[in-house]
Every structure is written in C-alpha cells, then in structure tokens.
C-alpha cells in the first residue's frame, strides 16, 4: 500500500546564473529564466541613448548595404551563387536540428537568398578582368560583409523601436510584438524535409486544368519535378561526391590511365563527366535539366538579372535583408537564358504562394475558383490527418447550422470530428499569411493573427454554443438538407477547438493564443497544417495523442508557456509529461525560454528523409508494465479504457514506479497466501489495484466494488481509480480495465453498510502497514485508510 503523493517539484539551484544589475539570467537545464532589473532611471538613460544613436545606426546599415550591392554588381552572377551554395552546403553538413547551427553558419545560409535577391535587383557589370583568385577573394569578402550586416540587426531593433515609440507612432506594448514578430519573420524552413511536399500533393491536383492551360504541366509533373529538386538541392551534391570517389576507385582498379587507349579514356570520361558536372557544374541547379518542366512554368518563377524593381525602391529600408526578398516572389534566377535554383528554402517555403500569385496575374478570373477549390482541398487534407490520428473517428466537413430560429441565415463550420466521447470543432484557414515584413506592415500581420486565432475561436465558440443550446443539434449541407446530429455537450468528456492554417505562419504566430490583443474564449489551439502533419507522424496511439492534447490545452492558460514553435509543446510533453506543472514553478513575472526541447524531435524528423540514418523516435520514459497496460487498453473496447490509460499516464515517474512495484508485490505475495491482495495508493493520487493471477482466490466484482466504495467514504472529495489486471501463470498480461469511482456513484441505501465495512478495511490496512514497515503507524503519519488526515485524527481508535 502506497501513500506517496504526486508531489510538485521545486526549482533547484540554477546551473548557470548571471546578474549585471540590469538583467538577471538563470539556466535550469534546458530552461532559461530572465528578469529585467533596470531601475526607471537606468531605463530612461538607455532609452535616450538608443534614440540618439538610431539615425547613425541606420546610416551605417545603409552604407553596408550599398557596399555589398556594389561588390555583387561586379561579380560573375553564376559563379558567386555557386560559391555561396558550396559554402552553405558545408554549413549544412551533419546538421539535424536548428540548435546545431552556429550564428555564422546561419548567416552563410541566409547569404544565399540575399545575394540572389541583389543580383535580380541590380544591373550587372562583371567584365571578367579579374583573376579567379581575386574573384574568390571578393566572394569571401562579400560573405564577411553580409555576416557583419546581419550582426547589425541583432541590435538594430532596439534602436529602431525606441525611436518609433518616442515619436508616438507605435505604443511600447505593441512595439514588443512588432520586434519579436519581425525577428521571427526571418526564420526559414517551414517543414521537415520528409514532409516537404505532402501539402502540395493535396493542394495542387484540384488546379490541374489551369496548370496545364497556363504552363503546359500537370500537377503530378510539378510534384515530380519538386521531388527531384528537393534531392538535387540537398542530398544531391553529397551523393555526387560519394559517387565520384566510388567510380574513380573502380576506374583506377580496371584501367591503367597511362597505358589506356583513346577508347578506354573516352569511356572513362563518359562515366565521370556527368558526376563532375554535378559537383563543379550546374547540373544540380539547372531547373530545366533537373525537372524537365515546360519553359513557361520555369520562366514565370524566375527573375532575370536586374529585373526586379521593387527591392531597391528608395523606401526606408530599401535593399535591407529584413525586407521581403525577391526570392520569396520568384525563387529562380535566370542567367544567360538558363534558370537556376540555389536556395532550398526560398523554393520550398514559397513555391505554393509564388505559383498562386502568378496564376492570378495570368488569369485573374480564376481567383474565385482557386479559392473554392483550395478550401475544399484544405478541409479534406486536415480531415485526413485527424482521421489518421484518431482511427475510427467520424468526420463531417462543410457543416451549416441556423444562425437564429430558422434556416434563412446559416453559420458555417469547416470540420467536426467525433472520436468516442471526444468532440473536435475545427476551423481551417486556407488564406495566405502576409509575406511582407512586420516592421513596415504590422497591421496586416495583426489582422492575420486575429483571423487565424480570434476569428477562428469565435467561430468555434459559436458552434459550441449552438450544440449546447440544441439537444440534439442538427447540422445541414449548403443546400440546407439535414446531414447529421450532435448529442448533448455533457455527453463528451472533452471538447477541443482548433484553428488549422494551411500556410506555415511564422514562429511568432505559433503563440498567437498568448497575444494580449487576441481574446480566446474557447481555448482554441492554433496550429499549422505542417505541425499537425508532424503530430500525425509522431503519435501512433489515439490514447497518447488525446493525453498530449489535454496537456496542450492546459498550457493555453499558463503564462510561462509562450512557445516560439508548436513542437516545443511536444518536446516538453516528452520530457516532463504534465509540463504545465513544470512551467508553473517559475514566477509569472519571469520571461522563460524553453530552449532545446525540440532537439531530439528535430533529429528524428530530419532523419526520416534518409531512413538509413536510423531515426529514433524520442518518447516518454514509461515503465514497460505501464506501456503494456496502455497498449492492451488501446486494443480493447472497454468504455473507460481512455480514462484508465490517462490516469496511468498522469502519474509522475515516481508514482509510475510505485504502481509497477505494487503489481510485482501482488504477483509475488498472492501465490504465497493463496488469495488476492489489494494494492492501493491514497494521497494526491488514489487507486485500488486488483491483480488476478492463476491459482489464488480472487475477490468477486461486488467485493471489489465494496472495497473501493468504502475507501471513498474515508475521503469523499476525491475519486478513486479502480483498476483490474489479469495475468497468466507466466506473467503475461491478459486483461486490463478500470473505472473512476466517486462518492456520487454510491447508492444512498448502501452508505451505512459500507461505513461498517470501511472500519474493517481500516483495521486491515493498519495491520498491513505494521507488517510491511515493521512498526506502528506514527501519530502524525498520513492515515493508511486514505482519508488524507493524520493518523491521530482518524483511525488511531482502531488499533
């Protein structure tokens, strides 16, 4: 019998601590807590300094941009892009998580898109007068200048924000959001490579007719080409080098090059030249060569040298890399009549929206049709993910219900899903997220955040309210024909509302639920399709997915949990299980950075693209006995199986170990005495565990019910989980079921009898305690009966 509580952990001594009088930083493992210590006087002094320095800082950045542009304008466009590609590839080698990259490596990768953006926005004056050595020196110098430029932005936002707030243009509170949103606007990489094309496989086919009409290619052909580009722009170069070494060794073993005939040398060249072209030429980057696409499609997604006129437009931040880059609009660059693709992220992060804009430009009348087809495809692909996460669930799309008392005016819901006693109300946002930078277009971002979170939450709340007010609640199709009914809300154990966006919004929007200019009434979980796709790959159990969702919903109300990436929630869940408890240990006024929780997930998902790298899925550390029980519950049909599994998953690591020890104690002790021994825990968690094994006298169902009910009478405030486990003679689990029992479940006519029985059980527990611990129960010990009281104020009379 265990009385051990599920204790809340306390913060231990920090692993690292820093305090300079202005800021306090403390690191606890992967968690960094920060507190502002500046006095009002210090704050005002720093404020004045930033304000006065801003014009100088801006002028310095303008000069850096001009210098970089001038230097790039006299470079061979193709050669400098190949150079930056090679440097970026070196930075990517053996990297699986964003935490693996240094700031310098990130800047080299970012230099690719910036250099290409300048090339397509600037007249080129390369004259090939310099030696190759001098050209390479210039390329390295440009990379160093770009790195210095990006370093400027680490501090620029401080100067700019103070200057703007002081001018009265923007409030201090809103400025914090703008700066953070702007910094995260620069993050690249929407999804893991293994899932890179999954959304497009669903979104492009509905537009097949217009793709053929405008570009002469089918959706299938576009996907095939993108698959080839995905390989050539990532793994292709490394594989070419490996192939080069392998083929060279084979030739060296079979052909003596000094004595070889012209025919043999020619044959060797035929083998090696294609590989050499991949490594040192443009074979991996020529869009036509790699994809075989029609020239119309390639041309519409390509900028020529100096063709883009909007990047250097004379505006406040003209030509700065923090603005919307031309590579977002058109990912390819055309040089001497050939289109090339060098930057992986510019292509795959922006391909769908870039293609959409070009279709709208070429065929404006198609806008409405595009929107209708996109909405249907978006809802279908979100539905498919949820049905994979919740096998056997029922899903309804395109659901309408009356706004008032008649069917004249209807409200719409995108998706409703019912899984056993769980209801999912889902709104799918298929519109595009702003491509412009928040620093000069924050109003558009505010509207987007509001639409994807607050508006979706309002729609979910409205649907939930309709269901609650109508028992049952009928839903209709667009023609007002009745489709199905939803029973009472009280019939569901949990209701989840989601806003799922097709666009992978930036990391700032990933915590839209924490923005104070957005009000959520239904605790709507705001998530992108890409992150939902990751969840669909990660969770292979509906029970585990539902348990995670419970913690994810709780996190909405915890101010210390303000993630910059949705998958940080999953990382914290894997590490801490009920991670809201961990987060609540930190004072609410502290700014907490949950750093590194996604690293193992990054490693796993990145390796999925190359299975030979042996991807290992990170999982919670759960004892085998508990895992075995949950898996058996998963396969069963007991109506309480999810509640029972979640009860076990809720246990702390220590409590799970206690539970397993209780199982083993029962299996060891029961054959010795020939009867069933009840294993129980009374504290912050309460359960009665009945382990049935062959050859012993087991308690009947009514006897077990009496035992549980009598224990409830000792503390009416908390329910008790009744758990039955059946094992064979070899210790194999054959059956598992559970039921949560409360005081309200006990018939009033049974209470007197159960009170008498509870006294007998109390005496038995006292005797059991004395046998187990070889001492009497201490007067101040928790009473073994499970009341939560001290022994001296409870069952001491039964000694």
Image (cartoon, rainbow, N blue to C red):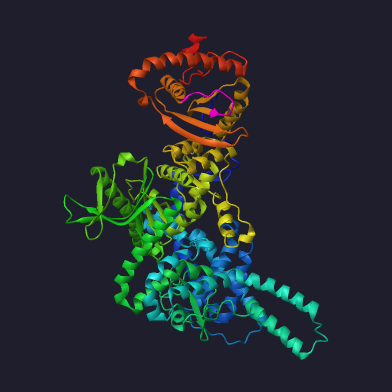
Quadrant in the rendering for residue 276: bottom right
Residue 210 visible? The answer is yes
Residue extending furthest toward the bottom: 262
Residue at x-position 48% and y-position 53%: 535
Q: Is residue 768 magenta?
A: no
Q: Main secondary structure of the magenta part?
A: loop
Judge by depth and name the residue closer to the eye, 546 or 791: 546
- Image quadrant occupied by the N terminus: top right
> Position of 54 compared to 601: left or right?
left
Q: Is residue 697 magenta?
A: yes
Residue at x-position 64% and y-position 61%: 612
Residue 135 place in picture, x, y as percent: 63, 80
- In the rendered image of this protein, does residue 268 appear above or below residue 157? below
Judge by depth and name the residue closer to the eye, 753 or 507: 753
Quadrant in the rendering for residue 325: bottom left
Q: What segment is highlighted magenta in the picture? A: 691-700
Judge by depth and name the residue closer to the eye, 220 or 137: 220
- In the rendered image of this protein, does residue 493 appear above or below residue 446? above
Residue 202 place in picture, x, y as percent: 42, 65
Residue at x-position 35% and y-position 26%: 744
């Amino acid at each position: 019998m265990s009385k051990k509580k599920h204790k809340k952990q306390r913060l231990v001594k920090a692993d690292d601590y820093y305090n300079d009088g202005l800021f306090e930083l403390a690191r606890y493992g992967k968690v960094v807590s920060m507190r502002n210590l500046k006095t009002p006087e210090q704050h005002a002094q720093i404020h004045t300094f930033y304000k006065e320095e801003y014009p100088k800082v801006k002028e310095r950045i303008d000069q850096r941009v001009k210098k970089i542009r001038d230097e790039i304008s006299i470079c061979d466009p193709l050669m400098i892009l190949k150079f930056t590609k090679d440097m970026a590839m070196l930075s990517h080698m053996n990297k699986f998580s964003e935490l693996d990259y240094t700031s310098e490596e990130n800047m080299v990768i970012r230099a690719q898109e910036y250099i290409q953006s300048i090339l397509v926005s600037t007249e080129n004056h390369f004259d090939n007068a310099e030696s190759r050595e001098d050209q390479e020196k210039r390329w390295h110098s440009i990379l160093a200048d770009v790195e210095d430029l990006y370093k400027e932005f680490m501090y620029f936002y401080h100067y700019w924000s103070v200057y703007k707030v002081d001018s009265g243009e923007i409030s201090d509170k809103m400025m914090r959001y703008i700066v953070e949103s702007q910094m995260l606007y620069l993050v690249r990489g929407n999804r893991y490579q293994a899932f890179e094309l999954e959304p497009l496989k669903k979104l492009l086919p509905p537009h097949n007719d217009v793709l053929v009409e405008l570009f002469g290619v089918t959706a299938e052909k576009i996907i095939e080409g993108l698959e080839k580009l995905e390989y050539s722009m990532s793994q292709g170069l490394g594989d070419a080098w490996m192939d080069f070494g392998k083929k060279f060794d084979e030739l060296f073993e079979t052909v003596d090059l000094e004595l070889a005939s012209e025919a043999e040398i020619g044959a060797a060249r035929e083998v090696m030249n294609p590989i050499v072209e991949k490594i040192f030429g443009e074979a991996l980057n020529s869009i036509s060569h790699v994809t075989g696409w029609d020239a119309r499609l390639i041309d519409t997604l390509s900028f020529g040298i100096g063709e883009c006129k909007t990047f250097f437009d004379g505006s406040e931040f003209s030509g700065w890399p923090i603005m919307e880059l031309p590579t977002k609009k058109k990912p390819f660059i055309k040089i001497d009549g050939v289109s090339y693709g060098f930057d992986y992220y510019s292509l795959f992060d922006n391909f769908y929206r870039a293609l959409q804009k070009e279709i709208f430009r070429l065929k404006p009348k198609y806008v409405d049709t595009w929107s209708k087809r996109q909405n249907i495809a978006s809802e279908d692909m979100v539905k498919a993910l949820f049905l994979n996460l919740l096998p056997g669930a029922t899903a309804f799309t395109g659901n309408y219900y009356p706004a008032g008392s008649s069917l004249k005016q209807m409200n719409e819901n995108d998706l409703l899903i019912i899984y056993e006693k769980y209801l999912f109300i889902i709104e799918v946002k298929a519109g595009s997220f702003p491509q412009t930078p928040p620093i000069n277009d924050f109003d558009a971002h505010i509207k987007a955040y509001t639409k994807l979170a607050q508006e979706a939450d309002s729609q979910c709340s409205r649907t939930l309210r309709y269901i609650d007010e109508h028992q049952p609640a009928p839903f209709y199709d667009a023609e007002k024909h009745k489709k199905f009914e939803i029973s009472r809300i009280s019939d569901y154990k949990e209701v989840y509302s989601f806003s799922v966006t097709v666009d992978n919004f930036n990391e700032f929007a990933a915590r839209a639920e924490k923005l104070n200019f957005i009000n959520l009434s239904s605790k709507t979980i705001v998530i992108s399709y890409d992150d939902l796709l990751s969840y669909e790959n990660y969770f292979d159990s509906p029970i585990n997915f539902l348990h995670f969702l419970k913690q994810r919903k709780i996190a909405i109300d915890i101010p210390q949990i303000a993630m910059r990436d949705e998958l940080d929630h999953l990382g914290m869940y894997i590490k801490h299980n009920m991670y809201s408890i961990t987060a609540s240990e930190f004072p609410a006024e502290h700014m907490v950075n949950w750093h590194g929780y996604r690293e193992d997930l990054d490693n796993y998902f990145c390796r999925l693209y190359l299975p030979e790298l042996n991807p290992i899925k990170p999982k919670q550390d759960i004892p085998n006995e508990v895992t075995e029980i949950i898996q058996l519950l998963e396969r069963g049909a007991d109506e309480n199986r999810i509640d029972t599994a979640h009860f076990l998953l809720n246990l702390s690591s220590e409590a799970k170990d206690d539970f397993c020890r209780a199982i083993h104690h029962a299996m060891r002790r029961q054959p010795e005495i020939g009867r069933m021994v009840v294993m129980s825990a009374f504290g912050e968690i309460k359960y009665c565990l009945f382990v049935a094994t062959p050859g012993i006298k087991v308690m009947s169902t009514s006897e077990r019910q009496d035992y549980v009910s009598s224990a409830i009478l000792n503390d009416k405030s908390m329910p008790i989980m009744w758990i039955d486990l059946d094992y064979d003679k070899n210790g194999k689990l054959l059956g598992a079921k559970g039921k949560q029992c409360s005081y309200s479940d006990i018939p009033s006519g049974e209470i007197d009898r159960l009170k008498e029985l509870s006294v007998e059980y109390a005496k038995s527990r006292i005797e059991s305690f004395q046998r187990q611990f070889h001492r009497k129960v201490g007067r101040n010990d928790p009473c073994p009966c499970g009341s939560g009281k001290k022994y001296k104020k409870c069952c001491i009379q039964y000694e």
